Image (spheres, grey):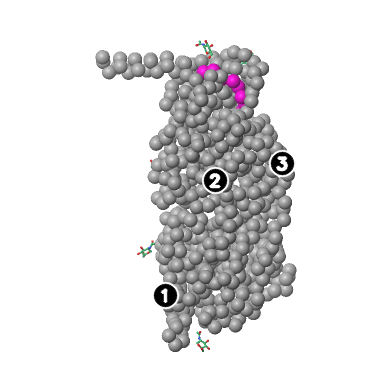
């Protein structure tokens, strides 16, 4: 046979085969349909929902394979014009794989519908109750392509669309949601696990098994478990709007809608807007930790203050948090302090006015007078909003802690670990610039905040203690969705943070080499989770211990931030072995922002606070 006639015959046989396809056969048991691009005729299904740009139909001749969805989207803005939910229709069209962004999953749909015929009307439409009429969503793994850990480095070694794995909806969350693509489902007893986004899109779990539930009702990510059992409720199909005012732990009426991959996530597009039944209680207790005002037990807090400048509307509420919820820590590490002109890009780099305005607000609420230390960065060299010049700074109560041998460095001065005095056989580490920035010329800090190191002496202490205030490179550039095509998902700037972890950790290792019993605290916004490579590198290089681990905070309560489906810890305090092993060491996260409604959030991060004995021996 000539090649051209072979081609012609293969095409012809596929066309005739396609004429008899069921919806399950079109979807198949993989992500990408094996009929992609082909014309299909007389596809028959029950109309289960209508949307502004198309309709969803469910097979009238289902198979019993959990991996093949029985429903499909029919894309065409006029296709639903003369159709009613409950009609059984037959139609012709083309199987199409659609996505609007190269990092998203493809949606299998029938496009260009024609010859739409109503075979019968008034048929019952019954949604599938998730976990009853379907499997329950897997609770740990997203995809077979993540090799067991969604944060494996390197990221992005495979694409779902290229590998096109056979769906295993009992094991992998994305496979589960893909196996329901186009289906009409009901979520029983939904609970919000995060504040909605600005469009009112709301992450929920239903009454199925969920792991990682925290006390506020959210889902906290833990090592190798980033909560694939959660699903986002998107824009309602009837044109109503979900309220953006919900918060973690709010309970809703049962939600019925269509499963669809939209904007990079599997979502349920509800038939109508979410209705709240029971809002979560809004009360958060303040810290229980009480400073003794001397080295035996000083309180040390850390707080990302979200682009703070002298005119910030959240400055007064922030001061109130420091007074009422953190109980006026003796030493406070803050991150995201903007310069005195905020994000106006005018060459101003000093944050003196920002810090004194905050200190004055605290004083007027409490009568307590804080001092500050801070090193202004080189203009626009440290990332963040252009002109904002965000940096890390310390506030401290001078009656309790003071800089040890102060010698403030400039933006480009690298502080070094030096020996202050040799007291017998025991050298005392000190810093050549105190406070000083760590290796500011190292390319690893390009467009990123340089850590601010300081040595301090607390009231009554025999020896100094040491701090490093960090704000490592943010994930927000270059990351991809946990529901996206790239596996493992791209963890934005992870390579930069690994390098930053090594530099920060090596500096601390020099202190501990001189004095293995030194009290060192590294705190701030590390922009990384404790179980992911940058933090593992940091603790391996420095010997520093995660305070969450040291004091045994329950894994579900280890969070300072909420992003997509996960409550998560971007902020940490790590301490040297001497502090980690001391029985008196305490640590708490104050979940005042991460779970709250937007209007009640002062920052996007929660503060944390520790109580430590820094007397030294
Ligand atoms: C289309 O499908 C329906 C039901 O699946 C069947 O009854 C009908 O004969 C088919 N029509 C054609 C033209 O194949
Ligand atoms: C809907 O029905 C009207 C009246 O029969 C017809 O003119 C119109 O073309 C139909 N629209 C579609 C999209 O089938
Ligand atoms: C995955 O897809 C993206 C976008 O098309 C592409 O840039 C990347 O190279 C692909 N990765 C692999 C491992 O094929
Ligand atoms: C900010 O304060 C520091 C230390 O108090 C001082 O050296 C510096 O000149 C001040 N900068 C401005 C712009 O006021
Ligand atoms: C060294 O020891 C002396 C006496 O034991 C003490 O007064 C002094 O503060 C120590 N110096 C440092 C830097 O710790
Ligand atoms: C840290 O950096 C040093 C110097 O560049 C390098 O030799 C070492 O391998 C790095 N360590 C880790 C754990 O990345």
Q: Closest to the observer: 523 or 360?
A: 523
Secondary structure type for disc 3: strand
Q: Is residue 173 left or right of residue 292?
A: left
Decide: is 15 above or below 422. Answer: above
Q: Which residue occupies 62% across, 28% down?
A: 127
**For the residue carrying disc 3, how many other residues have a C-alpha within 10 Å: few (<14), some (14-19), or many (20+)?**
some
Where residue 380 appears, x then y in whole percent? 51, 61
Decide: is 19 above or below 97. Answer: above
Q: Main secondary structure of the magenta part?
A: strand
Q: Which residue occupies 54% across, 31% down?
A: 180
Distance Cα–Cα, label 2 vs label 3? 23 Å
Say which label, 2 or 3, has the lower sequence index: 2
Residue hosting label 1: 513
Specify the label residue 120 is tagged with.
none
Say which label, 3 or 1, has the lower sequence index: 3
Distance Cα–Cα, label 1 vs label 2? 40 Å
Specify the label residue 227 is tagged with.
2
Q: Is residue 609 visible?
A: yes
Labels 1 & 2 near each other (Cβ < 8 A): no
Labels 3 & 1 near each other (Cβ < 8 A): no
Q: Nearer the viewer, mark 2 or mark 3?
A: 2
**For the residue carrying disc 2, how many other residues have a C-alpha within 10 Å: few (<14), some (14-19), or many (20+)?**
many
Secondary structure type for disc 1: helix
Where residue 298 appears, x then y in whole percent? 61, 74
Residue hosting label 3: 276
Say which label, 1 or 2, has the lower sequence index: 2
**Residues drawn in magenta:** 43-51
Q: Closest to the observer: 315 or 27?
A: 27
């Amino acid at each position: 046979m000539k090649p051209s006639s072979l081609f012609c015959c293969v095409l012809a046989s596929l066309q005739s085969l396609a004429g008899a396809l069921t919806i399950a056969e079109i979807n198949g048991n993989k992500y990408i349909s094996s009929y992609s691009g082909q014309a299909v005729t007389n596809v028959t299904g029950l109309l289960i929902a209508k949307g502004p740009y198309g309709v969803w139909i469910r097979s009238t001749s289902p198979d019993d394979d959990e991996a093949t969805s029985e429903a499909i989207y029919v894309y065409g803005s006029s296709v639903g014009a003369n159709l009613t939910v409950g009609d059984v229709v037959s139609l012709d069209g083309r199987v199409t794989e659609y996505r609007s962004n190269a990092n998203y999953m493809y949606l299998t749909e029938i496009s260009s519908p024609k010859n739409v015929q109503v075979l019968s009307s008034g048929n019952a439409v019954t949604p599938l109750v998730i976990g009853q009429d379907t499997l329950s969503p897997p609770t740990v793994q997203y995809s077979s392509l993540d090799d067991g850990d969604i944060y494996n480095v390197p990221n992005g070694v495979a694409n779902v669309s290229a590998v096109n794995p056979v769906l295993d909806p009992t094991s992998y969350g994305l496979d589960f949601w893909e196996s329901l693509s186009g289906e009409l489902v009901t979520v029983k007893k939904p609970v919000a696990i995060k504040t909605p986004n600005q469009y009112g899109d709301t992450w929920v779990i239903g009454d199925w098994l969920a792991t990682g539930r925290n006390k506020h009702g959210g889902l906290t990510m833990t090592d190798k478990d980033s909560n694939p059992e959660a699903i986002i409720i998107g824009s309602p199909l009837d044109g109503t709007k979900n309220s953006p005012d919900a918060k973690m732990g709010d309970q809703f009426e049962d939600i019925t809608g269509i499963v669809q991959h939209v904007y990079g996530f599997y979502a349920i597009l509800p038939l109508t807007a979410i209705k709240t039944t029971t809002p979560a209680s809004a009360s958060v207790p303040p810290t229980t930790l009480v400073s003794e005002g001397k080295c035996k037990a000083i309180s040390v807090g850390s707080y990302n203050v979200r682009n703070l400048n002298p005119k910030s509307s959240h400055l007064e509420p922030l001061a109130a948090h420091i007074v009422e919820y953190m109980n006026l820590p003796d030493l406070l590490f803050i991150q995201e302090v903007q310069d005195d002109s905020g994000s106006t890009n005018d060459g101003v780099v000093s944050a003196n006015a920002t810090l004194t305005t905050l200190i004055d607000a605290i004083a007027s609420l409490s009568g307590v007078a804080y001092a500050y230390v801070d090193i202004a960065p080189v203009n626009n060299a440290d990332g963040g909003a252009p002109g904002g010049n965000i940096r890390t700074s310390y506030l401290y109560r001078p009656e309790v802690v003071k800089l040890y041998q102060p010698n403030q460095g400039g933006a480009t001065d690298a502080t070094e670990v030096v020996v202050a005095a040799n007291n017998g056989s025991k050298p005392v580490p000190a810093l050549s610039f105190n406070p000083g920035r760590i290796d500011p010329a190292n390319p690893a800090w390009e467009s990123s905040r340089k850590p601010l190191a300081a040595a301090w002496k607390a009231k009554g202490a025999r020896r100094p203690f040491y701090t490093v205030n960090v704000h490592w490179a943010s994930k927000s550039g270059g990351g991809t969705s946990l529901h996206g095509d790239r596996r493992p998902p791209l963890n934005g700037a992870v390579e930069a943070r690994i390098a930053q972890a090594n530099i920060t950790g090596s500096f601390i290792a020099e202190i501990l080499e001189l004095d293995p019993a030194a009290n060192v605290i590294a705190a701030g916004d590390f922009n990384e989770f404790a179980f992911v490579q940058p933090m593992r590198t940091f603790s391996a290089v420095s010997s520093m211990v995660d305070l969450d681990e040291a004091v045994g905070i329950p894994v579900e309560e280890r969070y300072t931030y909420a992003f997509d489906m996960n409550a998560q810890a971007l902020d940490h305090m790590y301490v040297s072995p001497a502090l980690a092993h001391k029985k008196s060491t305490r640590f708490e996260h104050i979940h005042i922002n991460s779970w709250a409604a937007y209007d009640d959030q002062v920052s996007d991060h929660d503060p944390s606070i520790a109580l430590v004995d820094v007397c030294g021996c």
